Image (spheres, rainbow, N blue to C red):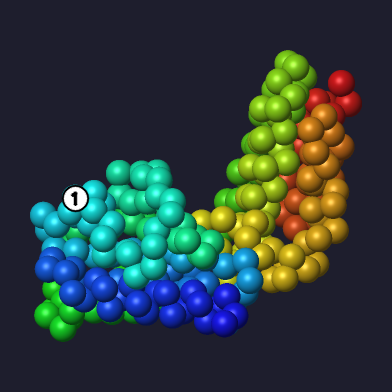
Amino acid sequence: MKRRDVLLDRMERIGRSVAEHDGTLMLLALGSIGQETERLDDYSDLDFFLIVEDGHKARFIDRLDWLEVEPLHYQFQNTKDGHKIMYHDGIYGEFAVFEVHELATIAYTPGRVVWRRDEALDVFATPDLAIERHAPSYYYEEALTNLYVGLLRERRGETLAGFELIQVAAVQNVLKAIGGQGDAFNPTRRVESRHPQMISFLLGGVLGYGRSGVAASAILRFIEERHVVNTTIKREIERLLET
């Protein structure tokens, strides 16, 4: 069976298991296993939320019997809300458990309902996009400040800290400015297939440890071609690039 089919089958079996437990309301598949199953490939995994009645969260975090549709060989509680897991056959997953009252306070993208208890229809609506988005100009301005502060740290001798701001934070903000239907939480995901025109930008803006000055120059040129850059911050970035 292809991994894509294994993942879909595993998600459905988890849904059937969840249905047998008291206090469960909804199993929501996210990411490529959610509303975009056409993206599933040999490198995909399971990503899902379990929504439960108030007062039942701890039971489903502390006891993972509801996930034992196949033997679990690895589990690591990485947050107060859930675990990272791996089944005996190498199928990997990440999940979180939320009570109904918590849904208004978390950010998540639309998901695919794998299973829902009938009475849950009147308890709450299917979750929708709850992530704040900004205009491209906002992300370009963020990237410019990333470049400036990153270069300051570079000049201080903080090479790794400068790398993080210039070649990671600034690059991610540029990708957010480009927008599109990418991953709402991580703009680097599938950027090569969604925005192949950005590969040349990445080749110039992500050069590795010790090369943040050259990368910053390339990122600044890219932004200037698409956004009106304030003359003062441009002057200061260029001053740092010259020193």
Q: Quadrant of residue 54?
A: bottom left
User: For this rendering, which residue is in front, 221 or 208?
Assistant: 208
The answer to whether 5 is drawn above or below residue 67 in the figure is below
**Quadrant of the drawing holding the C terminus:** top right
Residue 229 pos. (x, y %): 73, 46
User: For this rendering, which residue is in front, 82 or 224?
Assistant: 82
The answer to whether 10 is drawn above or below residue 214 in the figure is below
Tell me if 32 is positioned left or right of 66 in this view: right
Q: Element at badge 1?
A: helix
Judge the density around disc 1: few (<14), some (14-19), many (≥20) Cα neighbours within 10 Å. some
User: For this rendering, which residue is in front, 182 or 140?
Assistant: 182
Residue 169 pos. (x, y %): 64, 42
Q: Which residue is mark 1?
A: 58
**Residue at 47 percent of width and 61 percent of height:** 88
The answer to whether 7 is drawn above or below residue 237 in the figure is below
**Quadrant of the drawing holding the N terminus:** bottom right
Tell me if 102 is positioned left or right of 33 in this view: left
Residue 52 pos. (x, y %): 19, 64
Residue sitting at the far top: 156
**Residue at 80 percent of width and 25 percent of height:** 240
